[in-house]
C-alpha cells in the first residue's frame, strides 16, 4: 500500500529522507502520524556541471543541505528533533579525522 500525502502538523515528528545519484539529489519531507509515516513534500534537483564533479559524500551532504534550505520554514522551531535518513556509508568519510597540510 503506497503512502498517502498528508497536511503539515507542526507538532508531529519530522523525517527527511535524502539521496544523491551521479546526476541529481532528491529529498522527501515526511511526518509521523498515528504510527505511520506520511510524505508531505518532495524535492529533486539536477546537479549543475560543476557539482557533477563532487565526490559521493559531498553529493550526499549537498542533498541534506538542499533539503534543509528548501524546507527551512517547516523545520525552524519544531518541538522535536528532525530525523534525517541517508546513505550513511557514504558519509563515514565526513566523520573521520583528517590531517590537513598547508
Image: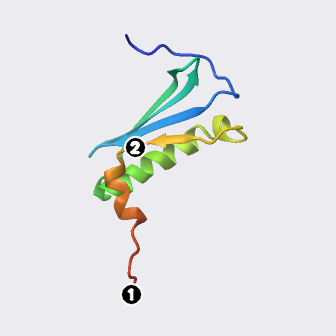
Number of marks in the rendered image: 2
Q: Which residue is drawn at 50% across and 45% down?
A: 66
Say if residue 99 shows up in the picture: yes
Mark 2: give few (<14), some (14-19) or many (20+) Cα within 10 Å.
some
In the displayed image of the protein, which residue is found farthest to the front? Answer: 35
Pair 1/2: label in front: 2
Q: Split into 4 quadrants, where in the image is the C terminus? A: bottom left
Q: Which of the 4 image quadrants contains residue 20?
A: top left
**Secondary structure state at the residue bearing disc 1:** loop
In the displayed image of the protein, which residue is found farthest to the top? Answer: 1
Provide the residue designation for mark 2.
86
Q: Residue at x 29, y 43 (%)?
A: 21
Provide the residue designation for mark 1.
101
Query: In front: 62, or 48?
Result: 62
Q: Which residue is drawn at 61% across and 31% down?
A: 13
Give residue 7's position: percent from left, percent from top.
62, 17
Position of 30 relative to 62 (above/below)? above
Query: In front: 74, or 44?
Result: 74
**Secondary structure state at the residue bearing disc 2:** loop
Give residue 68's position: percent from left, percent from top.
56, 44
The residues bearing labels 1 and 2 have C-alpha atoms spaced at a distance of: 30 Å
Do labels 1 and 2 touch, CB within 8 Å?
no
Query: In front: 7, or 22?
Result: 7
In the displayed image of the protein, which residue is found farthest to the bottom? Answer: 102
Amino acid at each position: 500500500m503506497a503512502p498517502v500525502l498528508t497536511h503539515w502538523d507542526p507538532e508531529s515528528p519530522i523525517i527527511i529522507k535524502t539521496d544523491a545519484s551521479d546526476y541529481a539529489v532528491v529529498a522527501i519531507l515526511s511526518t509521523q502520524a498515528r504510527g505511520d509515516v506520511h510524505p508531505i513534500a518532495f524535492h529533486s534537483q539536477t546537479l549543475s556541471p560543476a557539482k557533477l564533479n563532487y565526490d559521493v559524500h559531498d553529493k550526499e551532504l549537498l542533498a541534506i543541505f538542499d533539503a534543509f534550505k528548501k524546507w527551512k520554514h517547516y523545520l525552524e522551531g519544531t518541538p522535536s528533533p528532525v530525523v534525517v535518513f541517508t546513505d550513511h556509508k557514504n558519509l563515514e568519510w565526513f566523520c573521520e579525522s583528517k590531517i590537513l597540510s598547508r
